[in-house]
Image (spheres, rainbow, N blue to C red):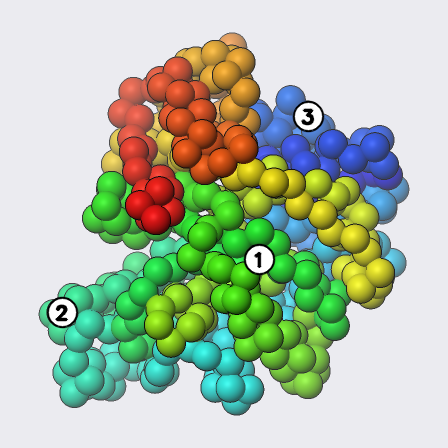
Amino acid sequence: MRVLVIGSGGREHALVWKLASSPRVEKLYCAPGNPGIGEIAECVKLDINDNMALVRFASEHKIDLTVVGPEAPLANGIVDQFTANGLKIFGPTQQAALIEGSKSFAKDLMEKYNIPTAGYAVFTDAESAKAYIKQHGAPVVVKADGLAAGKGVIVAMTIEEALSGIDAIMCDKAFGAAGSQVVVEDYLSGEEASVLAFTDGKTIVPMVAAQDHKRIFDGDKGPNTGGMGAYAPAPVVTDAIMQQVVAEVLQPAIAAMEKEGCPYRGCLYAGLMINADGPKVIEFNARFGDPETQVVLPLLESDLTVIMEACIDGNLADTEVKWKDGAAVCVVLAAQGYPSAYRKGDVISGLNQATEQGALIFHAGTAKPGEHITTSGGRVLGVTAVASDLLNAVNKTYDAVGRITFNGMQYRRDIAYRALKK
């Protein structure tokens, strides 16, 4: 097989790494990729939002399977374009990707089909949103309706925070066009978890449950980020909770999408809040999560290419999906200043020493302008380790982290703390 992965971050590096382990894969490309990906795949300089350039490349290079990493190409209709040209591609159509691309679409879908989620209201002007918040009170969650690279969410514990959130999103356009409409949601308390699932539009196969750490500082303090680390499996998702998630969230969502005329195939990500009332959906994503992918895929025993083709071809029900025992932990190393303006161009050292400890290093925001690998993004690296249990995986990961250095490097020192408390 000849496989193309679209994207350039840590999630895409994890996808490339897993796909490369398949005996079926003879040639692997990544557009545009990164220096870490370049060690196991051929990186090609293509604009991931130029559908026709990607179609031409896939046709000319006889690509058998294309895998879409980030959400923007999905929202841009890459799957529709590939399918129209007779090319196999893993991911939902443009219409189905609205489940992530529009928060209001997802909330309306959940309300219509009784999928458990927080109460909400949708606004297209700032004054109406502010009036609602003053009447509703805090805490409350304010979300930009469109795609905002995982950052368009403000968890406001006071009315003042919520009102300034409306100003930032709708008036100051902090997230561009994504903030032309906002969703204001009831605040949910409990413990968060991520359940990703493979689906062919009918059958659902959940992956190992993971837990992401969104806030920048230890103890879940500071602003939200794209994710500072993750671990799997997440003990908050017991067998009973997982059955509930499949029966009350994932299967109804897939059935709802088909009824709405936009059948969903690919990876469906359910971000959940779990408390005494059971699981409720915080958000759906139309692709693999980041950094959840970096802990879920190392625990997958089955051949990812076989599963992805089964999702595309509609025979997932006949496909075995096996998982390894043990646990995986990922710690994200971020640049100084992230998640605000961050420094770039710092030389990274110790990567070989970390991999010698048995860790997997997934590049997220790196560059190689000369001999050395340097920082080029907010989230620079994801350091992942797998072990027989969570405590050993945590220790192994942080042992590897301790061998990597770059100026201004910041990371959380408490990844998986909730599970370890249990």
Q: Which mark is residue 77?
A: none
Whole-Å distance between the Cαs marked 2 and 3? 48 Å
Q: Amino acid at mark 3?
A: Ile
Could you tell me which secondary element the residue under label 1 belongs to? strand
Residue beneath disc 2: 158
Q: Which mark is residue 40?
A: 3
111 or 42, which lies in front?
A: 111
Quadrant occupied by the N terminus: top right
Give percent across and percent down for residue 142: 29, 70
Could you tell me which secondary element the residue under label 3 belongs to? loop
Marks 1/2 in contact by CB < 8 Å: the verdict is: no
Residue beneath disc 1: 196
The residue at the point 20 percent across, 72 percent down is 139
Give neighbour class at mark 2: few <14, some 14-19, many 20+ (Cα, 10 Å): few
Residue 375 visible? The answer is no
Could you tell me which secondary element the residue under label 2 belongs to? loop
**Relative horizontal placement of residue 17, taking residue 409 as reference (left or right):** right
Q: Which of disc 3 and disc 2 is earlier in sequence?
A: 3
The residue at the point 49 percent across, 36 percent down is 389
Q: Amino acid at mark 1?
A: Leu
Q: Which of disc 2 and disc 1 is earlier in sequence?
A: 2
Q: Which of disc 1 and disc 3 is earlier in sequence?
A: 3
